[in-house]
Image (cartoon, rainbow, N blue to C red):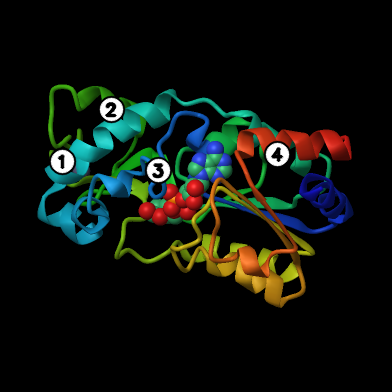
């Protein structure tokens, strides 16, 4: 019933927008942050993933990021990512706004992906600005902790992701909120919707008249604002919606 209603809604979308979170990559093997087995059930995010803790001690950041980075670099898009790319290709989605930094939406073929929390695929030296691929730095982590800049030797190499305490990327935030204000269907997938301002995006869309669908493994604070709520795995639910709309 909810599946059919979600498909009907997606099929009406002229300006559909998706917001995704870590749950959409869970079936690619990348652990989520919250919920069962989430990263923040093991570590205090402020201690290991804030700009303040990073600058105080890059080693503590990299000792957690090393494993997560290895998993993310090896991960491949799952049927949920593919289904979202198919919805965009069929014209039901104009963009995906993602909180994820794993690049799997792009790997799945999604063309317009707005990364609110940056990308984990690049690393920047905070001192000289040198950019390097994360995959290059990942190999050095086996013998060098924390990794050092190949140009200036700095120990302050940071993935181009937004850590707690850092400002949101202005252009990405602007584009996301602009598209949210124009959206007629807002599809929220795999997010606990507890981190702002990313969680503002669906609220802006609903306030502007968008009809919201929430697909998540467990209840979210925004279920009450959604026209359709499906508690399930995105890698199963999204392809079923695509099959129903024939995208
Ligand atoms: N399908 C759908 N939902 C799933 C699946 C799945 N296969 N597996 C887990 N989930 C749900 C979880 O129940 C949880 O509610 O995905 C949600 C993931 O929530 P979080 O781990 O909080 O991820 P997210 O909402 O993206 O976090 C936002 O917090 O720590 C910061 O920067 C980090 O971008 C992240 C932000
Ligand atoms: Zn440098």
Q: Nearer the viewer, mark 1 or mark 2?
A: 2
In the rendered image, residue 127, in percent from the top left (x then y), is placed at 20, 51
The answer to whether mark 3 and mark 1 are in CB contact below 8 A is: no
Give the alpha-carbon distance from disc 1 to disc 2, as whole Å. Answer: 18 Å
Residue with the mark numbered 3:
36
| Element type at mark 3 | loop
Label 2, ligand 2: CB separation under 8 Å: no
In terms of image quadrants, where is residue 38?
top left
Q: Nearer the viewer, mark 3 or mark 4?
A: 3
Give the alpha-carbon distance from disc 3 to disc 1, as whole Å. Answer: 41 Å
Q: Nearer the viewer, mark 4 or mark 2?
A: 4
Q: Residue at x 14, y 37 (%)?
A: 146
Residue with the mark numbered 4:
238
In terms of image quadrants, where is residue 235?
top right
Find residue 138 and name its label.
2
Q: Is residue 23 left or right of residue 38?
A: right
Query: Mark 2 or mark 4, which is nearer the start of the sequence?
Result: 2
Residue with the mark numbered 1:
152
Label 1, ligand 2: CB separation under 8 Å: yes
| Element type at mark 2 | helix
The answer to whether mark 4 and mark 2 are in CB contact below 8 A is: no
Q: Around disc 3, counting alpha carbons within 10 Å, would you say few (fewer than 14), some (14 to 19), or many (20 or more)?
A: few
- Vertical side of 59 occupied by 118: above or below: below
- Name the residue nearer the viewer: 245 or 93: 245
């Amino acid at each position: 019933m909810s599946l059919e209603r979600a498909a009907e809604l997606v099929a009406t979308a002229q300006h559909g927008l998706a917001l995704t979170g870590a749950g959409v990559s869970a079936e690619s093997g990348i652990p989520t942050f919250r919920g069962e087995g989430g990263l923040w059930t093991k570590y205090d995010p402020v201690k290991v993933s804030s700009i303040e803790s990073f600058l105080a001690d890059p080693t503590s950041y990299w000792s957690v990021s090393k494993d997560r980075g290895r998993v993310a670099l090896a991960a491949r898009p799952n049927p949920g990512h593919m289904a979202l790319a198919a919805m965009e290709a069929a014209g039901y989605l104009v963009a995906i706004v993602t909180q994820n930094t794993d690049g799997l939406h792009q790997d799945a073929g999604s063309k317009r992906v707005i990364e609110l929390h940056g990308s984990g695929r690049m690393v920047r030296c905070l001192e000289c600005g040198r950019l390097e691929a994360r995959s290059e730095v990942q190999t050095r982590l086996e013998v060098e902790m924390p990794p050092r800049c190949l140009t200036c030797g700095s120990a302050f190499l940071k993935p181009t992701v937004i850590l707690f305490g850092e400002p949101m990327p202005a252009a990405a935030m602007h584009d996301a909120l602009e598209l949210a204000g124009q959206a007629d269907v807002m599809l929220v997938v795999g997010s606990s919707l507890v981190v702002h301002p990313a969680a503002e995006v669906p609220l802006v869309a609903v306030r502007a008249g968008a009809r919201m669908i929430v697909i998540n493994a467990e209840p979210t604070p925004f279920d009450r604002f959604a026209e359709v709520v499906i508690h399930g795995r995105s890698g199963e639910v999204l392809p079923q919606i695509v099959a129903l709309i024939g995208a």
